[in-house]
């Protein structure tokens, strides 16, 4: 099985998420977090926690694919011609 590739965010995505983390700490925890600390936290979540979200996305995709394949299979059976 091929390992999950490293999650890579572009500069704009990183900046936006860092702003979101800083706002979260301010609003919910009444604490200030600097840009460096927020980037460090983002790196941690990307490398250590991201795999759980990635795997859930794969499982959701697999479930959707299985559902679609089952539906297609049923539709193909409906097209069969039955000989009396």
Image: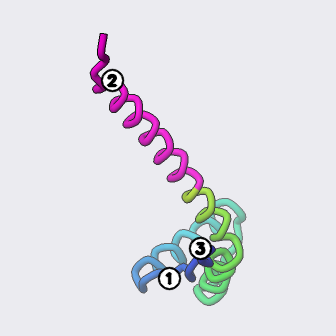
Tag nearer the camera, 2 or 3: 2
Gap in Å between the C-alphas at discs 2 and 3? Answer: 56 Å
Which residue is at a point 30% across and 25% down the rendered structure image? 80
The local crowd at label 1, few if under 14, some if 14 to 19, many if 20 or more residues have their Cα within 10 Å, is few
The residue sitting at the bottom extreme is 36
On the rendered image, what quadrant is the C terminus found in? top left
Secondary structure predominantly adopted by residues drawn in magenta: helix
The correct choice, above or below, for 67 with respect to 15 in the image is above
Which residue is at a point 62% across and 89% down the rendered structure image? 36
Quadrant of res 30: bottom right
Which residue is at a point 63% across and 83% down the rendered structure image? 43
Residue 5 drawn at (x, y percent):
56, 80
Magenta-drawn segment: 59-84
Q: Which mark is residue 22?
A: 3
Residue 54 drawn at (x, y percent):
59, 65
What SS does tag 1 mark?
loop
Residue topped by disc 1? 8
Q: Answer with mark 3 or mark 1, whichever residue precedes in sequence.
A: 1
In the image, 11 versus 6, the foreground residue is 6
The residue sitting at the front extreme is 84
Say left or right for 57 vs 16.
Answer: right
The local crowd at label 2, few if under 14, some if 14 to 19, many if 20 or more residues have their Cα within 10 Å, is few
The local crowd at label 3, few if under 14, some if 14 to 19, many if 20 or more residues have their Cα within 10 Å, is some
Residue 58 drawn at (x, y percent):
56, 59
């Amino acid at each position: 099985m091929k390992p999950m590739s490293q999650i890579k965010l572009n500069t704009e995505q990183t900046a936006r998420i860092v702003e979101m983390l800083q706002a979260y700490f301010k609003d919910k925890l009444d604490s200030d977090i600097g840009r460096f600390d927020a980037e460090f936290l983002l790196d941690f979540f990307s490398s250590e926690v991201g795999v759980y979200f990635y795997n859930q996305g794969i499982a959701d995709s697999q479930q959707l694919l299985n559902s679609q394949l089952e539906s297609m299979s049923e539709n193909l059976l409906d097209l069969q011609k039955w000989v009396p």
